[in-house]
Structure formats: C-alpha cells, structure tokens
Amino acid sequence: MIRFEHVTKRYPDGTTAVEDLSFEVAEGELVTLVGPSGCGKTTTMKMVNRLIEPTSGRILLGGEDISAADPVELRRRIGYVIQQVGLFPHKTVLENTATVPQLIGTPKAKARARAAELLELVGLDPAVYGGRYPEQLSGGQRQRVGVARALAADPPVLLMDEPFGAVDPVVRERLQNEFLALQKTVRKTILLVTHDLEEAIRLGDRIAVYGAGTIEQFAGPAAVLAAPATDYVASFVGSDRGLKRLAVTAIGPADLMAADSGSPAPAAAVELGASLREALAALLQEDSGRIGVTDPDSGELVGVLTPGGVHRALRRARLQEA
Ligand SMILES: Nc1ncnc2c1ncn2[C@@H]1O[C@H](COP(=O)(O)OP(=O)(O)OP(=O)(O)O)[C@@H](O)[C@H]1O
C-alpha cells in the first residue's frame, strides 16, 4: 500500500535525514517507526503526504507514484495525527471532528452525524463532549478527538506522529489499547512514529528500527526482540528484552490447565490470546496464584493459567522463533 523505493532526503543545509530507504507497508498493516531523536522518523512520514519532498527515490501509494499526485488531493486520502493534536480552539469537539468531511463537500448534517459516530468509537460520548471546546478536555481526550478527526474522512492511510505522546503513562496505555481495538475494526494502513520502544512493540504489526537515517531492522516485534539484526538494534532494545517479550507473546490453549470442576473458578480472568504481560499482571494480583482464561467470543472459561503456564508459553515462543 505504501512503498518506499531508495528514498533519500537531504535538507538544503546538507543534513542527510534519511538515506536510501526501501520498505513496504501492506494494506491494513500498522508499522511503527522507532528510534532515537533525530534519526529521520518524522522526515520519513512527512514525505508520504508530501509535506516534505524526497531528494531522490520514489514513494508509491497503492501503486501510484505520489510525486505525480496533487498534494491537496493526496492529503485527503491520508489522515494525519500529530502529538500536539492541532484542534481548532474556537470550534467545538463535534465541529472539529466534522471539519474534513465538510471541507470535501459532505452536507453538514451528515458530516456531524458521522462525527458523532466517530466520537462514540473513540470512547467520547458525543452528548457529553460534542459541545465542548478543546480547552475543556483533558490531554488524553484531546488526543482521542485528534484520532476521531483523522478517521472522519475515512482515509485508507493514517500517519501518526507520536499520537499518544502528550499524556501520562497510564492514560497512554489505555489510549493504546483502545486504539488497537479500534484498528481491529477500521483496518487502516498506518505508519506510526514513536521514540518509545514499548509503544512500538505493543502497537506494531511490524517495526522499523531506525539508526541514523537508515532502517536497521524491519520485522515483527517478536523477531526484533528475539533476534536483533545488528548490535545497534540489540543495544536499542536493551538487556530486558526477555521482559518485553511478555508483551508480544499471547497465551495459547496449550499453556492452560483444565478448570478444575471441584475448586471455585478464579476471581480474575483474562482472555485467550491476551499477552503474557497482561496475564502476569493479573496473576500477581491474585493470592491464589491462578487466573481464569476465557474465550473472547463466548466469554466462557476455557482453562486456568498459573505461573507454570507463563513459563510454558515463553518456552513455546522461543522454540517457535528458533
Ligand atoms: N528543515 C530541516 N532542515 C535541516 N535539517 C533538518 C530539517 N528537519 C529535520 N532536519 C534534520 O534531519 C534529521 C532527521 O530529523 P527528523 O525530524 O526526521 O527526526 P526524528 O527521528 O523524527 O526526530 P524526533 O524523534 O526528535 O522528532 C535531524 O538531524 C534533523 O535535525
């Protein structure tokens, strides 16, 4: 869907921001760009909606070379979410969300109805928040409006630059989870820039780990953690990558013990397919040392997870990757 072919960007002062980048983002895929400050992530992203033009190489969107596209028309196909959100201060939340559809000629009533739906989708009750002004919202709520607004024109592609950057870690984690659930339904093709490795791992179907102006590794989160491609990536992901793997390993049926009909069902439960990190957090809260695991569709208890099951799952994941 988005394809970079040997893209280099040199700024007029001689700074090479990115050099010979080639990678592809599949339709419906969420790719996170992660790396230290100044490594070229934002430059990469802004070349996709032509806020920055490459010095050489080309970028294709759905097979079409974007250098031939009209930038205004191009940006209509590409939602853009930035850290500072950039909401219009003098417009209400509903008006902010309806801005783009109205700009492209959607009748006002229809644009507003759609905006209300989207606010609902990002967890903001339009009856409560629709009439408020941005300054009357918390940072996390503003970021949700930013996401709703970017989705409003239903663009196939979303560019997100540190979209959850301006909120505290707890709210951030909640927004990330909500966003992942949302992505399951909307299935946009997304490039998301972050300097936070945990965020990149949590959100990305694949991760591009940037060094200075180049991608050092482009792979799924589990592969980046299990087999860093270079010494640089190894030091970037750090020595606690074993722990980080908890976040990318899901609980499978083989990790569970049968729910014993004799003993009471555990009080806490997570869903099958939840991350080991989530399961471990729940286990640590449970004095009994066991939690229930439920079927995400039916909600029925399918088994019981103990710390031994977490070990089994990690071992299984290591074997699969080997
Ligand atoms: N307009 C510009 N003129 C000259 N150099 C620039 C310009 N914009 C960015 N750069 C340089 O290009 C390099 C890459 O910048 P970029 O903003 O893409 O990095 P980044 O990875 O997004 O960083 P951060 O995480 O700090 O936002 C940096 O060295 C930066 O100083």
Image (cartoon, rainbow, N blue to C red):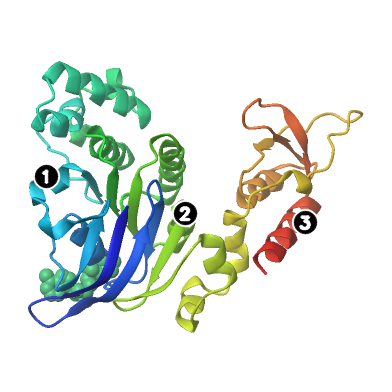
**Residue at numbered disc 2:** 205
For the point 29% across and 51% down, which residue is it?
Answer: 160
Secondary structure of the residue carrying tag 1 is helix
Which of disc 3 and disc 2 is earlier in sequence?
A: 2
Residue 37: horizontal and vertical position, in percent?
Answer: 30, 71
**Residue at numbered disc 1:** 73
For the point 43% across and 45% down, which residue is it?
Answer: 176
Ligand 1 lies under 8 Å from the Cβ of mark 3 = no
**Residue at numbered disc 3:** 312
How packed mark 3 is, by other alpha carbons closer than 10 Å (few <14, some 14-19, many 20 or more), is: some
Residue 18: horizontal and vertical position, in percent?
Answer: 25, 74
How packed mark 1 is, by other alpha carbons closer than 10 Å (few <14, some 14-19, many 20 or more), is: few
Q: Quadrant of ligand 1?
A: bottom left
How packed mark 2 is, by other alpha carbons closer than 10 Å (few <14, some 14-19, many 20 or more), is: some
Can the viewer see residue 164? no
For the point 37% across and 69% down, which residue is it?
Answer: 35
> Where is 265 relative to 255, above or below?
above
Residue 247: horizontal and vertical position, in percent?
Answer: 57, 55
Q: Nearer the viewer, mark 1 or mark 3?
A: 1
For the point 43% across and 38% down, which residue is it?
Answer: 178
Quadrant of the image occupied by residue 253: top right
What's the residue type where badge 2 is placed?
Asp
What's the residue type where badge 1 is placed?
Glu
Secondary structure of the residue carrying tag 3 is helix
Q: Contact (CB < 8 A) between labels 1 and 3?
A: no
Q: What whole-number distance in Å separates the C-alpha atoms at marks 2 and 1?
A: 28 Å
What's the residue type where badge 3 is placed?
Arg
Residue 128: horizontal and vertical position, in percent?
Answer: 29, 20
Which of disc 1 and disc 2 is earlier in sequence?
A: 1
- Position of 199 compared to 61: left or right? right
Which of disc 3 and disc 1 is earlier in sequence?
A: 1
Q: Nearer the viewer, mark 2 or mark 1?
A: 1
